[in-house]
Amino acid sequence: MSLWDDPTFKAMEQNLTPEQKREYKIAGELLYNTIDYETGQLLDNNSNLQDLLLAIKSGLRYCDLDNDDLNLLKKFYNKEEIDNLFTSHN
């Protein structure tokens, strides 16, 4: 049986709120983008993104971002997802 076919995990996913689903999606993307799957090496390209996401959760406003921050977010998220990051945390 696949982990994704497990009834326990299916029930858990169905009971998540939209905000919880978004949080899991972000965590999964961060994890996925932390590993070079060809070499098995950990990448350090997400530490800045993780710091930025934490700052957003802590109240950083969109107007406070500089161009580097915006470009980093645009590398991982589309416009709607970026907007959701700010509306869900501020």
Image (cartoon, rainbow, N blue to C red):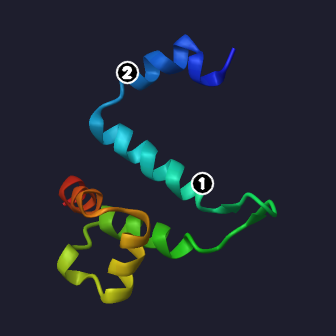
Q: Nearer the viewer, residue 73 or 58?
A: 73
Amino acid carrying label 1: it is: Tyr
Q: Nearer the viewer, residue 60 or 33?
A: 33
* Mark sitting earlier along the chain (1/2): 2
Packing grade of label 2 (10 A; few <14, some 14-19, many >=20) is: few
- x, y percentage for residue 38? 78, 61
SS category of the residue bearing label 1: helix
- x, y percentage for residue 13? 43, 25
The residue tagged 2 is: 14
Cα distance in 3D space between marks 1 and 2: 23 Å
Q: Nearer the viewer, residue 40 or 46?
A: 40
- x, y percentage for residue 87? 18, 57
Q: Residue at x 23, y 55 (%)?
A: 84
- Cβ–Cβ below 8 Å for labels 1 and 2? no
Image quadrant in which you'd find residue 55: bottom left
Packing grade of label 1 (10 A; few <14, some 14-19, many >=20) is: few
SS category of the residue bearing label 2: helix
The residue tagged 1 is: 32
Q: Quadrant of the C terminus?
A: bottom left
- x, y percentage for residue 10? 48, 18
Q: Residue at x 23, y 82 (%)?
A: 64
Q: Is residue 3 above or below residue 74?
A: above
Amino acid carrying label 2: it is: Gln
Could you say which disc has been placed on residue 4 in the image?
none
